[in-house]
Image (cartoon, helix red, strand yellow):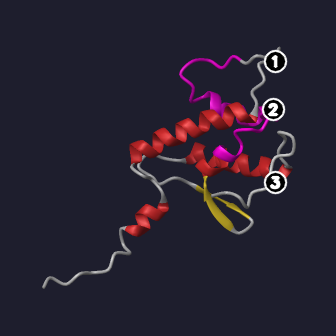
Amino acid sequence: MTNFLPALHEGHASITLQNLFRDALEAYDDWGASMPEPLVAFEGKLLPISDVFEWMKPCTDIMPANLIGIVTDRLNKPWSGDGPLDEMTVSTAARVMAVLTRRQLRDFGRGSIEVFAERFNHPVRANA
């Protein structure tokens, strides 16, 4: 799956992982209906945004203020955190985005670009 991604260090993500998470959030924000799951690039490899969200679920870092809106704008009720400033952790955001991604994939079908490509890679069979 994503075992080539850097590990979290005691719940904290490296700047590389933080940037990848930001890219995944922005890709989700641009994701239109009836489109396959967006992919993001990491060290020359493409991976679905759902993998990034799954990878970041244990991250205890605080969400950057400029990205919180991507998550909170999609919630059914206003965000209210546990902290005095209603801080949201990356873990919380990743869990929310993982659910939203699964929901959109379910609505689209399997939703990956690989599935789209598979439709054209079947050998042609001659009728005998």
Instruction: Name the secondary structure under disc 1.
Output: loop
Residue 30 appears left or right of 57: left
Q: Quadrant of residue 83?
A: top right
Residue beneath disc 3: 16
Question: Which residue is located at x 67 percent, y 57 percent?
Answer: 2
Residue in view at x 47 percent, y 38 percent: 103
Crowdedness of circle 2 by 10 Å Cα count: few (<14), some, many (20+)? some
Q: From the image, tell me which residue sits under label 2.
A: 62
Which mark, by number, is residue 85? Answer: 1
Horizontal relation, residue 71 to residue 32: left or right: right
Among all residues in the image, which is located at the extreme top?
A: 84
The span picked out in magenta is: 53-80
In this rendering, the answer to whether 40 lies above or below 118 is above
- Left of 84 or right of it: where is 90? left
Where 19 sits versus 95, above or below? below
Which badge, 3 or 2, is on the more N-terminal residue?
A: 3
Q: Label 3 to label 1, Cα distance in Å?
A: 26 Å
Number of disc labels: 3
